[in-house]
Image (tube, helix red, strand yellow):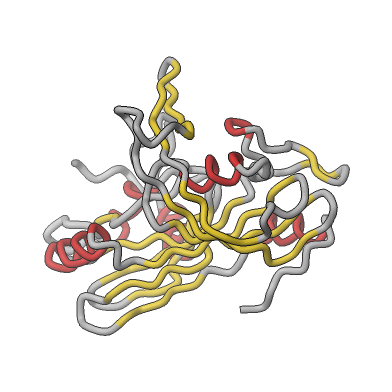
Amino acid sequence: MSSPNLTEADIAFVRSLVIHEDDAIIAFNKPSGLSSQGGRIKAHTLDDLLFAFARSSGNRPRLIHRLDRDTSGVILTARTKPAAGFLGKAMMGRRFRKTYLAIVGGGAPEPAGGVIEAPLRRMEIGRESYMKVCPADHPDAETAVTRYRTLARTAEAALVECSPQTGRMHQLRVHLASLGRPIAGDARYGGALTLGGVAVPRLMLHAARLSFPHPDGGTTTIEAPMPEDMATMAAALGLAVPVP
């Protein structure tokens, strides 16, 4: 892929997103609205912006995983091919631990915490893909497991911490919707666009923490604070955000 024409503003923007950097990896706090890779919208993706960190060889950091365009939070890249290979194998071996925060409508899930084991299958409508809960014996079924717990609640909303044990597309969004508690702002899966008389600005899902084996040894944990729009929404709903 050829390098896109990045402006000084583009370079300053992507550098402002860096929350961890060493010889092997760079981690970013991706804002909502920025596609990780290959978006159909004619705008730079995070993958494009990684050319700001390209070496003299022209090689840029490699994305290790993706976040949905409207999801904010921690996203990891590898600076080198060996680091990318190491991290890719670690992810395939389910050695990554991902923790998300979500604001859901309808109060706390019932039960307030537990494990969701609901197989998913991919559906296509036109150019759009989405996921649907399906029977385990469906020929297209993919195993999907999510651990969750309620951190704060009111009668009309809740702040839920989710830890996906598998990595299916839209997994957290579909699993929470399957409990009757869709994520606020998630129009695709039934999420409310207003809560408590307040307009929901976007999908209220944030990748708050990522723990993984580092290519140079040991375990690294990277955290991204809840973004202002989500914290403001939580405050408006009376949901106390726990201090890390």
Q: Position of residue 57 (x, y in %)?
A: 11, 59
Q: Position of residue 214 (x, y in %)?
A: 26, 76
Residue nearest the observer in this picture, 4 or 119: 119
Q: Which residue in the rendered view is the most extreme toward the right? A: 197
Q: Position of residue 14 (x, y in %)?
A: 43, 58
In this rendering, position of residue 18 left or right of residue 241 = left
Q: Where is residue 80 in the image (x, y as percent from the top left)?
A: 17, 66
Identify the residue shown where x is 67% and y is 37%: 191
Q: Which residue in the rendered view is the most extreme toward the bottom? A: 218
Question: Height in image: 152 above or below 229?
Answer: below
Identify the residue shown where x is 32% and y is 80%: 219
Residue nearest the observer in this picture, 46 or 52: 46
Identify the residue shown where x is 69% and y is 55%: 229
Which quadrant of the structure image shows residue 65?
bottom left
Q: Which residue in the rendered view is the most extreme toward the front? A: 137
Residue 227 visible to the viewer: no
**Quadrant of image for the C terminus:** bottom right
